[in-house]
Image (cartoon, grey):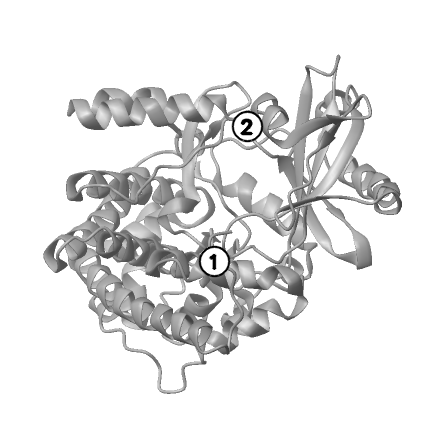
Amino acid sequence: MTTPAERRRRGRAARDRVSRSAHGRWIPAADRPDPLGVLERQAEDRVAGLLPIRYGRMADSPFAYLRGAAAVMAADLGAVPDTGLTVQLCGDAHLLNFGVYASPERALLFDVNDFDETFPGPFEWDVKRLAASVAVAARDNGQDEQQVRRAARTAVEGYAAAMRRLAGQGELDVWYTRVDTANLLPMLRKPRQRKRAEAELAHARRRTSLQAFGKLTEERDGQRRIISAPPLIEPLKRSELRGIGKVFSDYRATLAEDRRVLLDRYRFVDAATKVVGVGSVGTRCYIVLLEGRDPGDPLFLQLKEAGRSVLEDHLPPARVDAEVAAHHGGRRVVTGQHLMQAASDIFLGWTSGPAGRHFYGRQLRDMKGSVEIGDMKPAGLRAYADLCGRTLARAHARTGDRLAIAGYLGGADTFAEAIADFAVRYADRTVADHTELVAAIADGRVSATRGV
């Protein structure tokens, strides 16, 4: 068995593969793929009629563009050497893919909350995407360049501090570590920050199936049905509803036995397609309305398409585990979520749908919420970036060799400084890519629907 000291030495040895300071010397590769081409290739298997919504949402701001361009950044990250220190990656660890949700015990937890691109890979890819998202958000908020770099560095410092701490803990202690929002509020000393956090948590607690029931349904012919709001929400035709039964049965079979018993207490009422997110627009997504004891006891589930992770094409074949790559796409997402999150949705499962497409299922709303970063002041954004960095480190520590990563990071701030440099450079690149998308929309090369 490898000793803790040997594991740390393995991490330090990874500096010979990629020095810590080398991360900051990023420039676009000479043969960098055209970003618009990357997005177009990713969209080839999506619902064509929804793609203008995707491009319209990405055009809203550089940060919105970054959210939708995970495939572009994956290509950029794959073009440079990596540490070889593998963890289960989120694959899309930008600021808005962290948030609160209810644990099975109904505590509000803060954690990574999007796993569409999850896949094993080098730990620094998630750290770089998080730091870049912080830098882009800071710029969007009008912060000066010193504040932008400081915010990005804070996220990495939070990650490194948490990883060093976790490296000194036992396996069960690491596995059971969680960020309970009840423990966060006392840390907020400024009244304005605390008041804002309390309001956001209260809003999250209201985001339940019952709230969705009131917002997304209406009474038609004496029955409660999902509203029609094309192109964002479109109820299924009768012929399509019949096909959902098999899809739902296969999904049920992937749940733990006690969850199947619970799910069986509900009856199917209605289903519809729904547009979600920014980068996900165009993938197939269904919402399913179920009824429990009576019409006032609803459950909304979401079945979302899960294709290949954007990371898979950018890892050397020897680094892509054949078994993982061959997995059902929905199972990939579910497994990654269980590995990374401190606690996960009780209805998390997977299934196959029309044309053999892969899907994963979960509750549509279970006290889920995210922070509004659009008007954050510099101090508030730094505090949030630090929290996200520490949370990401906890997720990585569960799935990778935390002692090796801590050994690589060391006690100095070399890694944080380098990733901050990378984040600023990548923010520059993101602004340029966003500008190119806006120009392509303006001259008709890309069709976009704004404000939807």
Q: Which of 45 and 82 is in front in this view?
A: 45
Query: Is 299 displayed left or right of 268 in the figure?
Result: left
Q: What residue type is labelled 1?
A: Arg
Query: Is 193 displayed left or right of 117 in the figure?
Result: left
Q: For numbered disc 2, what is the local secondary structure?
A: loop
Q: Which of marks 1 and 2 is in front?
A: 1
Q: Where residue 319 appears, x then y in whole percent? A: 52, 67
Residue 450: which disc?
1
Q: Around disc 1, counting alpha carbons within 10 Å, would you say few (fewer than 14), some (14 to 19), or many (20 or more)?
A: some
Q: Around disc 2, counting alpha carbons within 10 Å, would you say few (fewer than 14), some (14 to 19), or many (20 or more)?
A: many
Q: Nearer the viewer, residue 129 or 396?
A: 129
Cα separation between marks 1 and 2 = 29 Å
Q: Where residue 227 appears, x then y in whole percent? A: 68, 35
Q: Which amino acid does label 2 sit on?
A: Asp
Report whether residue 5 is seen.
yes
Q: Which of marks 1 and 2 is nearer the N terminus?
A: 2
Q: Which of 128 and 201 is in front in this view?
A: 201
Q: Residue 345: which quarter of the image?
A: top right
Q: Where residue 119 appears, x then y in whole percent? A: 53, 56
Q: For numbered disc 1, what is the local secondary structure?
A: loop
Residue drawn at (17%, 22%) of the image: 191
Residue drawn at (36%, 72%) of the image: 433
Q: Residue furthest front?
A: 221
Residue drawn at (38%, 51%) of the image: 94
On screen, residue 29 above or below 432? below
Q: Mark 2 points at which residue?
A: 366
